[in-house]
């Protein structure tokens, strides 16, 4: 009997699923959405912060402690734009929650360029504002500011 496999999720569908996993604080599952050789870049990262993470393991290690520092509660604004390349999307979004250390609000906007191949994230350029790190308790990676 022939086996059928479900088609790989479209980039927008995979991205939205990833946001749900982040809200559920399932970082290991979120990292599982990445290709083994996936690359995450932060073009606006300030000095002392990583600008490029290579491979699923490095990305997972970077994100591992995120929920201990930033308690994401919602992504109330998510706009996903298709590009001429069907594997690449541009996402404008806003993440809100609270800073675990201080209890203060967390409210940050992001723009991301995401490429998905074979149902896995292979490239993610995250254009977040480094001004978000100025809030006490926001530096979840422990890197020097």
Image (tube, grey):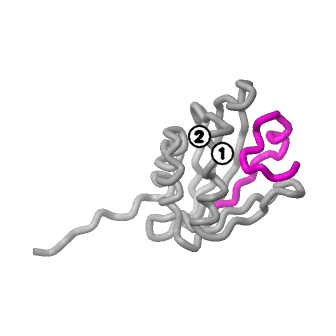
Is the N terminus in the top left, top right, bottom left or bottom right quadrant? bottom left
**Dividing the picture into quarters, in which one does residue 92 lie?**
top right
Residue at disc 1, secondary structure: strand
Drawn side of residue 75 relative to residue 105, left or right: left
Q: Reading the chain from its start, which is encountered first: label 1 or label 2?
A: 2
Mark linked to residue 141: none
Q: Position of residue 12 (x, y in %)?
A: 50, 53
> Taken as a whole, is the magenta stretch helix, strand or loop?
loop
Q: Position of residue 44 (x, y in %)?
A: 82, 55
Q: Nearest the camera: 119 or 48?
A: 48
Q: Which residues are magenta?
A: 124-145
**Dividing the picture into quarters, in which one does residue 7 lie?**
bottom left
Q: Verify whether residue 128 appears in magenta.
A: yes
Estimate how packed mark 1 is, as few (under 14), some (14 to 19) or many (20 or more) residues with alpha carbons within 10 Å.
Answer: some
Drawn side of residue 115 relative to residue 134, left or right: left
Residue at disc 2, secondary structure: strand
Q: Which residue is mark 2?
A: 78
Residue, x 59% and y 40% (percent of image)?
78
Q: Position of residue 15 (x, y in %)?
A: 52, 52
Image height of 141 relative to 88, above or below: above
Residue 94 in view, yes or no: no
Estimate how packed mark 2 is, as few (under 14), some (14 to 19) or many (20 or more) residues with alpha carbons within 10 Å.
Answer: some
Residue 90 in view, yes or no: yes
Residue, x 58% and y 66% (percent of image)?
57
Residue, x 45% and y 58% (percent of image)?
10
Distance from disc 1 to disc 2, alpha carbons, whole Å, reads 6 Å
Task: Tell me whether the residue at label 1 lies in contact with that at label 2, contact meaning CB atoms closer than 8 angstroms.
Answer: yes
Q: Which residue is mark 1?
A: 92
């Amino acid at each position: 009997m022939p086996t059928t496999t479900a088609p790989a999720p479209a980039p927008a569908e995979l991205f939205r699923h990833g946001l749900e996993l982040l809200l559920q604080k399932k970082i290991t599952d979120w990292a599982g959405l990445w290709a083994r050789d996936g690359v995450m870049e932060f073009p606006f990262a300030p000095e002392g912060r990583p600008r490029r993470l290579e491979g699923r393991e490095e990305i997972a290690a970077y994100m591992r402690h995120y929920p201990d520092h930033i308690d994401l509660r919602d992504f109330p604004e998510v706009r996903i734009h298709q590009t001429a390349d069907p594997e690449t999307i541009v996402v404008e979004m806003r993440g809100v929650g609270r800073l675990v250390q201080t209890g203060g609000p967390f409210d940050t906007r992001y723009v991301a360029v995401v490429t998905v191949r074979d149902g896995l994230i292979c490239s993610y350029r995250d254009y977040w504002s480094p001004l978000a790190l100025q809030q006490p308790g926001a530096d979840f990676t422990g890197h020097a500011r």
